[in-house]
Image (tube, rainbow, N blue to C red):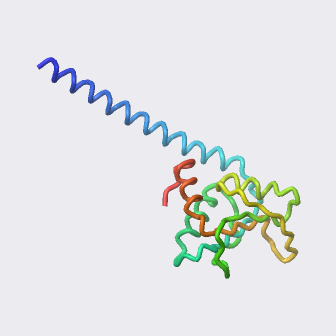
């Protein structure tokens, strides 16, 4: 009888320990998003193009929603004409590509470019490629942002 009581107490303590650990982990993720949103450039205008080749707008809506949660100004979000294999970020303003580097770091993208576009009102263009699942996995793992 004492063994059963001891095992029950151990299981209850283990359950509470796991619950507290899980809650703390999710709290860290949400604090990470808040901290990131405070370091964002509030005047940065972003264009997002979906070049995944996927039907529907779920990928575009997911990434747009995440960046809007960080207070980015999403000036345009739509489908690209072509499909590409990888995602990249284009800086339209800064030859040092600091804006593109910051966005790429947030999304976990390694490809950045500079391309001045005198007709564009956006500072950065994100072109989402077929590797979008890696970006979604990163945003879910690092920031707890769910679909």
Percent from the top left, x then y, of residue 103?
A: 71, 56
User: Residue at point 70% right, 63% down?
Assistant: 73
User: On the rendered image, what quadrant is the N terminus found in?
Assistant: top left
Which image quarter: residue 41?
bottom right
User: In the current view of this chain or complex, which residue is farthest to the left?
Assistant: 1
Rendered view: 46 above or below 109:
below
Left or right: where does residue 63 sit relative to residue 95? left
Rendered view: 102 above or below 22:
below
Percent from the top left, x then y, of residue 22?
A: 43, 39
Percent from the top left, x then y, of residue 112?
A: 76, 61
Left or right: where does residue 97 sit relative to residue 129? right
| Front-most of residues 136 and 78 | 136
Which image quarter: residue 20?
top left
User: Residue at point 60% right, 73% down?
Assistant: 52
Percent from the top left, x then y, of residue 122?
A: 78, 69
User: Residue at point 57% right, 58% down?
Assistant: 134
Left or right: where does residue 128 sit relative to residue 23? right
| Front-most of residues 39 and 106 | 106
| Front-most of residues 112 and 119 | 112
User: In the current view of this chain or complex, which residue is farthest to the top?
Assistant: 2
User: Residue at point 68% right, 66% down?
Assistant: 74
User: In the current view of this chain or complex, which residue is farthest to the front?
Assistant: 85
């Amino acid at each position: 009888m004492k063994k059963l009581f001891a095992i029950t107490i151990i299981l209850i303590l283990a359950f509470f320990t796991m619950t507290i650990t899980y809650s703390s982990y999710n709290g860290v993720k949400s604090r990470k998003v808040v901290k990131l949103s405070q370091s964002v450039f509030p005047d940065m205008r972003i264009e997002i193009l979906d070049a995944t080749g996927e039907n529907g707008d779920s990928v575009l809506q997911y990434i747009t929603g995440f960046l809007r949660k960080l207070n980015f100004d999403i000036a345009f979000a739509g489908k690209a004409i072509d499909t590409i294999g990888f995602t990249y970020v284009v800086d339209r303003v800064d030859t040092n590509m600091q804006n593109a580097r910051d966005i790429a770091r947030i999304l976990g993208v390694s490809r950045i470019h500079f391309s001045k576009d005198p007709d564009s009102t956006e500072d950065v263009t994100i072109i989402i490629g077929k590797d979008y699942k890696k970006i979604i996995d990163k945003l879910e793992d690092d920031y707890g942002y769910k679909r």
